[in-house]
Image: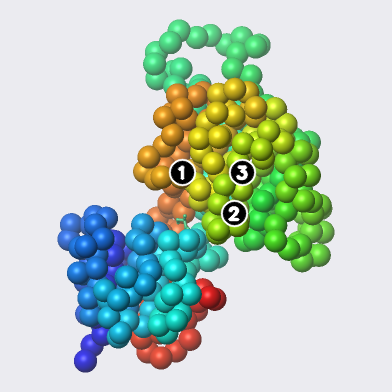
């Protein structure tokens, strides 16, 4: 019997073609976020599910799919939406897509850094509102980043890629995380390992690259923001809930920090209303990995993972419970 493969959202055609070689593939038509009851009905009898960061994948999900479910391959590097131990307890393999989205996400993080420090959004809004303007030497002055310090929270693949870009722009690097990076990486980036508090005090820009876990939820809260320099900027391209969004909105409105570049939000697709009003915030709607090339590579990796498990082989990028 051919396995049943459920793909919860539309993915790149070559990845669907790969899955169709192995099993009978079901994709929602039209593409849409399925409400939980529809999702649970759709996955009933699935041997593999290719999912996204929108679905809650937990014990109820596994029960709805049934005992034959072998693999959940998420098309994302982050898997905070998946209860990995609950699935592992049922013998279900979970895989994610590390590596293939590193550059796209690092590019976006650095783009937000430049956008907020150099006030791209303010300039564009001014032009689009047809407000009269003329060049003058004090007009829309931003903050230069050369010689400034970038604090990376989580020097994994994406954090390292952001640090490399920052080095090319003349910034120096400090970082924090659960453990120290390899000495090769530290040496290449000339990076200093600090505690989170030291990093928040020293950095001119803080960029978040740690995964969302119970330990990192609201890692950046009102106290952390108050520890930062009033001239500093915060960049978040990981998960919204790493930051207490209400506290951030407050800090930005009251000059506790200078600005923020945000690609992710605590209750997506909602954005705290204050953030939408403030000029010192650069905003993008969760676009970190959103290039055609990267999304195709992510879908292909997820499909390869699903196929490997269905064939009884080791997955390429398993999530270790
Ligand atoms: C991820 O992969 O976790 C991103 O947030 C979406 O690509």
How far across and down, in percent of the image, does residue 272 sit?
Answer: 44, 34
- Front-most of 88 and 299? 88
The tag earlier along the polypeptide, 1 or 3, is 3
Label 3: how many Cα within 10 Å (few below 14, some 14–19, many 20+): many
How far across and down, in percent of the image, does residue 321 sit?
Answer: 53, 75
Label 2: how many Cα within 10 Å (few below 14, some 14–19, many 20+): some
Q: Which residue is mark 3?
A: 220
Distance of mark 2 from mark 3, alpha carbons? 8 Å
Residue name at image x 65 percent, y 27 percent: 256
Residue name at image x 40 percent, y 55 percent: 292
Label 1: how many Cα within 10 Å (few below 14, some 14–19, many 20+): many
Residue name at image x 56 percent, y 34 percent: 248
Secondary structure of the residue carrying tag 2 is loop
Where does the N terminus fall, quadrant-wise?
bottom left
How far across and down, in percent of the image, does residue 13 sit?
Answer: 29, 66
Is 179 placed above or below 301 here? above
Residue name at image x 70 percent, y 27 percent: 230
The image quadrant of residue 89 is bottom left
The disc at residue 216 is 2
Is 245 placed above or below 141 here? below
């Amino acid at each position: 019997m051919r396995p049943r493969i459920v793909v919860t959202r539309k993915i790149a055609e070559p990845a669907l073609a790969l899955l169709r070689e192995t099993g009978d593939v079901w994709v929602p038509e039209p593409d849409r976020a399925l409400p939980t009851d529809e999702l649970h009905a759709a996955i009933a009898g699935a041997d593999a599910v290719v999912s996204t960061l929108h679905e809650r994948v937990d014990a109820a999900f596994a029960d709805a799919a049934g005992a034959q479910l072998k693999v959940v391959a998420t098309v994302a590097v982050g898997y905070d939406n998946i209860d990995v131990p609950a699935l592992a307890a049922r013998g279900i393999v979970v895989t994610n897509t590390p590596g293939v989205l590193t550059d796209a996400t690092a590019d976006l993080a650095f783009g937000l850094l430049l956008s907020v420090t150099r006030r791209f959004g303010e300039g564009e809004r001014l032009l689009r509102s047809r407000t009269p303007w003329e060049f003058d030497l004090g007009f829309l002055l931003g903050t230069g980043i050369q010689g400034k310090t970038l604090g990376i929270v989580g020097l994994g693949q994406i954090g390292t890629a952001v640090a490399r870009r920052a080095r090319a722009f003349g910034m120096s690097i400090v970082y924090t995380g659960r453990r120290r990076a390899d000495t090769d990486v530290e040496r290449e980036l000339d990076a200093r390992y600090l505690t989170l508090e030291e990093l928040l005090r020293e950095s001119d820009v803080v960029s978040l690259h740690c995964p969302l876990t119970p330990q990192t939820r609201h890692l950046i809260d009102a106290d952390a923001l108050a520890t930062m320099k009033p001239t500093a900027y915060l960049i978040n391209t990981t998960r919204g809930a790493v930051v207490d969004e209400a506290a951030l909105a407050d800090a930005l409105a009251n000059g506790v920090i200078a600005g923020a570049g945000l690609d992710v939000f605590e209750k997506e697709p909602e954005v705290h209303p204050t953030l939408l009003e403030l000029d010192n915030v650069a905003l993008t709607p969760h676009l970190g990995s959103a290039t055609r090339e990267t999304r195709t590579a992510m879908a292909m990796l997820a499909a390869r993972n699903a196929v490997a498990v269905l064939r009884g082989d080791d997955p390429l990028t398993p999530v270790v419970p």
